Amino acid sequence: MTEATPNVDMEKLVSLCRRRGFVFPSSEIYGGLSSSWDYGPLGVELKRNIKEAWWRAVIRERDDMVGLDTSILMNRKVWEASGHLERMVDPLVECKNCHQRWRADELGEPKCPSCGGDLTEERMFNVMFKTFAGPVEEEASVVYLRPETAQGIFVNFQNVLNTTRKRLPFGIAQIGKSFRNEITTGNFIFRSREFEQMEIEYFIKPGTDEEWFEYWLKERLQWYVTHGIKREHLDTYEHPEEKLAHYAKRCCDVIYKFPMGWAELEGIANRGDYDLKQHTAVSGKSLEYYDAATNEHFIPYVIEPSAGVDRSALAFLADAYTEEPDKDELRVLLRFHPDIAPLKVAVLPLSRKENLAAYARDVYADLRREWRVEFDDTQSIGRRYRRQDEIGTPFCVTVDFQSLEDNRVTIRERDTMNQIRVPISELKTTLSAKLGGEDLFVLPPGGEIWKVEKEADSA
Ligand code: ATP
């Protein structure tokens, strides 16, 4: 799993993210905090779009799924029952010379990777963050920051069943922060101690688990492709049976060709009836399902597709990154799928002259009711186009002096740089169609091809 994506190296991506306001190091003015990141004005839009696209695909467009938003702090019995207190552990070793700490199972040789020093014996380290609820720091008030969102779903299984009257098979999905005190972090937003997950627990009849596992694996792979990730940059990795997590019957990762090499983007696990059984045993509350058709009571099995928002953001950024020669220069662009792009449209008046600026502002005010749109009247038009290319805005709308006469504006497409000119009355519907994937040269009434830079490609 080492060959890296040819698109972009990590350094370039980190630098673009910082320069353009996607991601900043956390608490930077104080020297930062190792592996903590803040999402800037464009990063926050990118993340929202990823979460929205996921929510739309797994909840809005289906009738067998509902959403949930559970708390990060939970009764600690939850973690006793789920096995996390005992088993959410990584083998930790420390260098006797420089005192750096490492995950033993990630080291090739039993020497410190930093200074070559000898290492201590392995000890198991629980990666859950521990804190106290309330003002007294005593054992009885210990709580944990959740290391996954899944358990919030399991403990609400009966609540959801009772309130929604869903029948098997059905799923519960949630998006939220999780925390793991990882021994080693790194690779930018790939692995941090605080991150966001998008998790589905899909409840099914025991015995149908293999077929639902295949279904969700296919479905989740396709979601990334539909939203612009190149199929050849995605693959799957089946976990060998002896390395499965304590709750899993089977686990297969969707892996992505990240700048540092192939690595997990999302995990699909067959958790069997492990979690509901454990919570039944520890809480004493029945989490059984009653099947009226067969008059049976049983504990459902569950298939869990668990994705990371931050890892997805990194994959979408890496996959979108493109450099291409443009006259004597290099054009950098992020070829985001329109649903994922932080900004959908930029409105650019050709000049700051008052009558033109007012006209362009009206166009902007109208478009921003529909989409996240930016107005930019600084610098030359060429530089403004480059800036929008580099942050992945699919379309620029340019307002020029002729617009004042003929009530038409140009639409420039990011990937081809081709332009069409359309009546202002057709602008919204045209942009809507183009953002939905329609070819630029399909023209609305009164529209015309304005500039052909290159043939559209399918990439
Ligand atoms: P890894 O093997 O990389 O540590 P994992 O197998 O422990 O990951 P899961 O428990 O399957 O991860 O979590 C599901 C998803 O949550 C992962 O596929 C990933 O996208 C995301 N995730 C897990 N840990 C982190 C982290 N420390 N930083 C960012 N995202 C994470």
Image (spheres, rainbow, N blue to C red):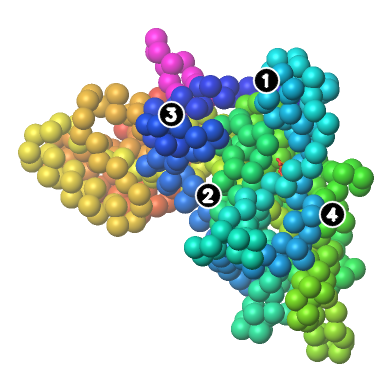
Image location (x, y in percent) of residue 174: 60, 62
Q: Nearer the viewer, residue 339 or 175?
A: 175
Q: Residue at x 57, y 50 (%)?
A: 196
Task: Report whether residue 270 is seen.
Answer: no
Location of the N terminus (image quadrant): top right
Q: Nearer the viewer, residue 219 or 113?
A: 113
Write down the region rendered in magenta.
322-333
Mark 3 vs 4, N-terminal side: 3
Cα distance between the residues tagged 3 and 4: 39 Å
Mark 2 vs 4, N-terminal side: 2
Q: Residues within 10 Å of mark 2 (few under 14, many from 20)?
A: many
Would you say the residues marked 3 and 2 are in contact, meaning their CB atoms lie under 8 Å apart?
Answer: no
Cα distance between the residues tagged 1 and 3: 22 Å
Cα distance between the residues tagged 3 and 2: 30 Å
Look at the image and say whether residue 78 sits in the magenta stretch.
Answer: no
Image height of 100 relative to 79, above or below: above
Q: Nearer the viewer, residue 182 or 376?
A: 182
Cα distance between the residues tagged 2 and 4: 30 Å
Q: Amino acid at mark 1?
A: Cys
Image height of 423 relative to 167, above or below: above
Circle 3 is placed at which residue position?
31
Q: Secondary structure at mark 1?
A: loop
Q: Secondary structure at mark 4?
A: loop
Circle 2 is placed at which residue position?
50
Would you say the residues marked 1 and 4 are in contact, meaning their CB atoms lie under 8 Å apart?
Answer: no
Asked if the beta carbon under badge 4 is closer than 8 A to the nearest atom of ligand 1, the reply is no
Circle 1 is placed at which residue position?
98
Q: Nearer the viewer, residue 335 or 240?
A: 240
Image location (x, y in percent) of residue 175: 57, 58
Residue found farthest to the right: 242
